[in-house]
Image (cartoon, rainbow, N blue to C red):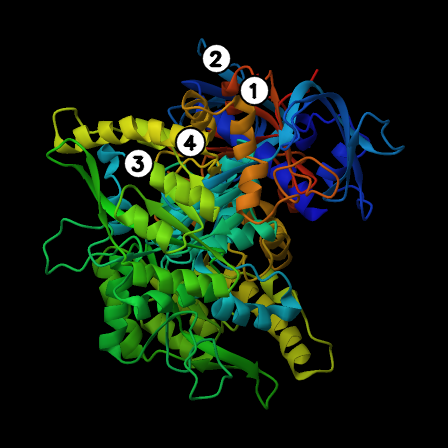
Amino acid sequence: MRVGGGWVVAASLVCCTALAQGSSPPPVTVIRAGTLIDGTSGSARRDQVIVVRGGRVESVGAGGTAIPAGARVIDLSGATVLPGLVDAHTHVLVDLASASEASSEYESMLLKENPAHKVARATVAVRRALEQGFTTIRDLDTEGAGYADVGIQRAVDEGLIPGPHMQVATRAISVTGGYELEGFAPEVGVPKGVQIVDGPVEARKAARQQLEHGANWVKVYMTHHSSLGAAGSIVDQPTLTLEEIQAITDEVHGWGRKVACHAYGGVGLKRALDGGCDSIEHGISLDDAAVSQMVKQGTWLCPTMSVYYTGWAPEGTAAGKYQRKRVEVHGASLRRALKAGVKVAYGTDVGGFSWKTPMAQEFPRLVEFGMTPMQAIQAATSRAAELLGMSGQVGIIAPGAHADVIAVEGDPLQDVRALERVSFVMKDGTVFRSAQPLR
Amino acid sequence: MQACRWVAVSAVLGCGLALGAEPAPAQPVTVIRAGTLIDGVSGSTKANQTIVIRGNRIESVGSGAAPAGARVIDLSGATVLPGMIDGHTHVFLQGEDPAEGGYDVQLLKYPLAYRAARAVVAARRALEQGFTTIRDVETEGAGYGDVGIKRAIEEGIIPGPRMFVSTRAISTSGGYNLEGYAPEVVVPKGAQLIDGPVEARKAAREQLENGADWLKVYMTHRSWIDSAGNLQSQPTLTLEELKAIVDEAHGWGKKVACHAYTNPGMKRALDGGCDSIEHGLELDDAAVAQMVKQGTWLCPTIAAYYGYWSPEDTPAGKRDRKRAEVHGPSFRRAVKAGVKIAFGTDVGGFSWNDPMAKEFPYMIQFGMTPMQAVQSATSRAADMLGMKGQLGVIAPGALADVVAVSGDPLKDVKVLEKVVFVMKDGKVFKESAPAK
């Protein structure tokens, strides 16, 4: 049943893409936007006209603007139009479909899955992102699939498969004892989901290799095992030493690129901040000192709140207690970070949860912990674009930006859940998805 | 939701299926009204047939009424035939246009994941064109990627045909690309290279262990024109090396496909027990008689030799023209003698944007009737794959792989380039326009 439905939908969406790409977009397209959220302005504008030429936004103006002759007109006057969204924390090579079975699925993925099968799944994942209006993603670790993200990125950029603009991190880095797979007899060699380094020389070499093979970001796991300590607070195992992370950030910054650091709290988080990480991923336990250091250094936070609400063990178990504590602490950390003015970018960790569930599920969480709907939308548009070094290019509807435009029915400023129902997706001026036939 | 706009099924359940609004019954019944039916085995067509499909199998074919409650697909204006079978594809190759870097760039510069992403696209291209089954005859340096693609299709993750895969293929030192590099430079090879019967058997064992359905062996490699103006080809495996592979594969109940152009490589291929000869550029009377005697299949891939020729005044250009010149008569000889022939294109060796059905006119030009050509891509190819009665036929008990074209392919075989309806395993993949 799912298969049948899926294929028909796939065929229809492919048809749309094929139509649009095969016949190449008309030279000028005009979008009538009933309500426009442009990604940077503090409020929405009514009745706007967006002119798209050559895959870029040429102008944005009031409703009375003259329509260029020969333009294709797309009427979204009943919808809210926004920039294509940005998810700054994805895993296209992973699809943990069932949170409660996550560890055995992960094991199976590393031990048994054919690499081409992973790529086949990833082609579906990138299309899912685009369908949902995420026209840009930052993918943070292939989890054992090597440099497959670079291959996917290339296939998307060449127009061979539909997908978002991608920034990729390739293999990611941790230390011995710092990543899955674990729990096997010591004599048995098992694959790891990241590249393992020990010492600053190996750390720098790994960074060099990954940059050489196409990494746009380098992803480092600065904490690993996490549990409830005796005092009832969360305790996190640090991984890289300060010297090891500094070797990586030094190398990566020399190439003009950036380092994303998975860090929960404690010593590992402190080393991440002292070591110059450009973004903290998750940031479960941010105390006042961490928050003020992030503000001072301009470090970004990509919190990924919603992934921690899935697959809970029963309440009385050790795991269950830990999971509930984690979200409690995480929510308080995000509140603290927002209050202090830490720069926050939208990220979901999708792949860590099923690609079949909505990527927009993060929006309500951000609002729950202190953002306004407009701030949450900006975290997924202009702010995330800034994190990615793509300000003015994506996450904004303004002259010169990529023509990545989406629309939702209803008003996301009243209810951010409207973002789960994207009805129109344009990327680089090509319509990928449209609720109504295009004239 | 726009899925309904595209699935032009005048149906009870069509849109419901697309929306996922209600669970389908365990064994949904679908009826196809076929204006003209080519069933894959009969020598002539049948008019106005009702094909009843239950679940993923064909239940009946006849002139009866549709069961009550069935979803009805109206193809009464079309010619309906079994889903077609291409017996020679390469989903991991994307043509060999010299302007784009030819063959070498794919092994040297295309990352594996990029090749796999393009293989995903190729698999869908095959299905779109009505090829609901393919035998993929090697990944050209992409290892066991074909097994991964096949599984992803079987699991419904991506759309594509049923696949019979060969994985890495086998040749000898000096027997496969990449070539032409400085001897000190280690380059990837597009096949698994072996020397001696022990390594040959070991390679066969590895490939079978890792999921090969068929083994593919290159029994000839370089080809050229000799001083007498004849086409020659370099033999690769010795008879002993080939026999080790065939013996191992047959022990596993699997078969061996052998690329072979001319003698002596061709003779070794036949003496060594290859189950199919791929290309068979120059089959002499003795070869043809041996193939008939042994029941060896021929998968000719004629059209592949008619494109992408090197310039006329070069040795390669002369050889390209000679190959095409001998291939047609060779095929004609095989058809006349009753050699079993399965349709194959070598797509991937040429661009996946070219129509796979471009092979059909060549088969007819060189001696087949249109019906024979269609059968080579349906029931005959199914027979080669050991799927007689299951695939390549529209008959009770067969898997419900059904396609349709507008017009009459027996009058104009080119209509097979425009398949308007594709059903695989009882599920509609494509329905371009309402049949009426």
Badge 2 sits on which subunit? A
Image location (x, y in percent) of residue B225? 16, 35
Quadrant of res A301: bottom left
Badge 4: how crowded within 10 Å, few (<14), some, or many (20+)? many
Query: Which of disc 1 and disc 3 is earlier in sequence?
Result: 3
Q: Secondary structure at mark 1?
A: loop
Q: Secondary structure at mark 2?
A: loop
Same chain letter for marks 1 and 2: no
Residue B409: assigned label: 1
> Gap in Å between the C-alphas at discs 3 and 1?
29 Å
Q: Are marks 3 and 2 in contact (CB under 8 Å)?
A: no
Image location (x, y in percent) of residue B50? 78, 27
Image location (x, y in percent) of residue B110? 30, 48
Q: Secondary structure at mark 3?
A: loop
Residue B282: assigned label: 3
Judge from the rendering whether residue B177 lies leftward or rightward of residue A330; answer left or right. Answer: left
Question: Residue sitting at 29 percent across and 29 percent down?
Answer: B326
Residue A276: assigned label: none
Query: Which of disc 4 and disc 2 is earlier in sequence?
Result: 2
For residue A77, above or below residue A152: above
Given residues A397 and B381, the one toward you in this image is B381
Badge 3 sits on which subunit? B
Residue A67: assigned label: 2
* Front disc: 1 or 2: 1
| Disc 4: which residue | A398
